[in-house]
Image (spheres, helix red, strand yellow):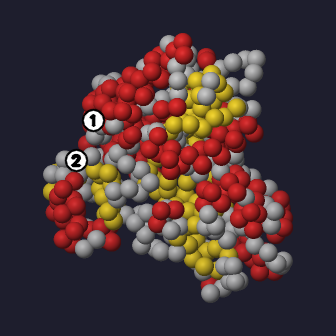
Amino acid sequence: MTTSSLPQPPRSRLGHAYREQLARHAPPGRPTAAARESAALTLAYRDRFLSGPAFLGETERRTVVDDLHTAYGLLRSLPERVFGGSVTALAAAVGLDPRQSALITRSARTGALLPLGRADLYHDGTGFRLLEFNITSALGGFENADINRAMLAYPPLEEFVRQHGLRYRDTLGCMVRTMYAECAPVLPTDRAPVVAVVDTAENFAVVGPRLRVFAAKLADHGVEGIACDLGELRYPGGRPTVSGRAVDVVFRYFLAEDLTDPATAALLEPLLVAVEQGRVGLFSRLDAELYGNKGTLAMLSDELHRDLFDAAELACIDRLLPWTRYVRPRTTDPGGARVGMLSYALAHRQELILKPTLLHGGNGITAGWEADAAEWENKVASAMDGPYVLQHRVRPAAEPFPADAGGVRELFLNWGIYVSGRGAGDDGYAGGFVRGSTDPAAGVVSMGSGAEVGCVFHGGDR
């Protein structure tokens, strides 16, 4: 298949121009060669790299970033708009247990919580549609700028990026700037801060090597990083230390879903006390994931709450969010009519996906189009009144990518678009990366489902 035979949606013009350049002149070599030589990138992604970058036009980038910041503000406003200001009530509504709720509510009373998150989106050919919004400090894909830098070692791409004035944003740098802003009251002014990158012992046994890479990369941003598990922290005089080294900030990689374990909650207690006493910063607060919970997306989408939003907010919701509802006996269909949830789910199995509100990484998800009718009925019935949502299927548009042997191949992308706080000269875009699959029916395009990963360059509208 040639590039000229493929339909070119407006957002792929840069990609089309890049493939045309490769067709005219492409020296030997592969743009992923340098990425495959990087120990850090190999640890994170093995050798599963896309054959080139994804491109995001400047106008489209600004539009999706604006929409994501609007959505973030709406999610943060849910306690006031829906629950009379109660974070505890919101936590209960999305399915957190009393222990999780108590810890999160307690954390919400300490320090600041600034915008930081990664939106997972599909592009359906007309615009981006939000599948999940990971609002947390524990963001995967933080090495994405390293993929940009590695791919720029390929001369045709470097030339194309230069000619079109393309750029990329270093996500890790944006994360560190957000950490500095949130934890400013406890940061030293006469030396580099010491930051412990912390997960639970169970998680650290799996992701520890990658978190050590993360901690080492913090040195590029003027931070001394140490990776450890929560049980390695000690509190002489009430201040956390790791191997005798006093810690200024705990960069949190454990999640709200980890807090159901009593042993984890017990290890967390002295850390929360130290935070409350101003002895250490916690980045980010425990309530961050509450606002990125899949259940909060259902609250934005639900017909029940439309009178809580103004016209501009509703336009953003309708543009960005697919139909998403809690799994309850009665609901509203996309047209606003009251229907039985189970009967609607059975009739539209091919267009629905079932997601738990409290898990991440594709865990616990059932795509209706991948399940048989009996399995689907059992899954939806079992999820009734539980911490689950149903979401309308978003069909990603095919994106043509250069094939290693020449020509092109069609891929279906899960876009990870990062956002952070806005300021002078900063519109709140914090970088991006993509995961690509050749399977148009994949329930979730993710590394866990066999996807390949690539970086994103933006700009080039001129």
The residue that disc 1 covers is: 97
Q: Residue at x 33, y 72 (%)?
A: 370
Residue 379 in view here:
yes
The picture places residue 40, in percent across and down from the top left corner, at 68, 54
Instruction: Tell me, yes or no, whether the two marked residues, 1 and 2, touch with CB atoms within 8 Å.
Output: no
Please state the total of marks drawn on the protein image. 2
Q: Residue at x 76, y 59 (%)?
A: 150
Q: Up-down: is 62 above or below 348?
A: above
Relative placement, left or right, of 377 versus 418 is left
Q: Nearer the viewer, residue 188 or 264?
A: 264
Q: Amino acid at mark 2?
A: Gly
Q: Judge depth for marks 1 and 2 and give the one in front.
A: 1
Q: Residues within 10 Å of mark 2 (few under 14, many from 20)?
A: some
Q: Amino acid at mark 1?
A: Asp
Q: Secondary structure at mark 1?
A: loop
Q: Nearer the viewer, residue 323 or 453?
A: 453
- The disc placed on residue 341 is none
Q: Up-down: is 285 above or below 388?
A: above
Q: Residue at x 49, y 56 (%)?
A: 121
Residue 61 in view here:
no
Q: Residue at x 33, y 47 (%)?
A: 357
The picture places residue 299, in percent across and down from the top left corner, at 32, 42
Q: Residues within 10 Å of mark 1 (few under 14, many from 20)?
A: some
Relative placement, left or right, of 442 versus 1 is left
The residue that disc 2 covers is: 386
Relative placement, left or right, of 301 versus 182 is left
The picture places residue 133, in percent across and down from the top left corner, at 46, 47
The picture places residue 209, in percent across and down from the top left corner, at 60, 49
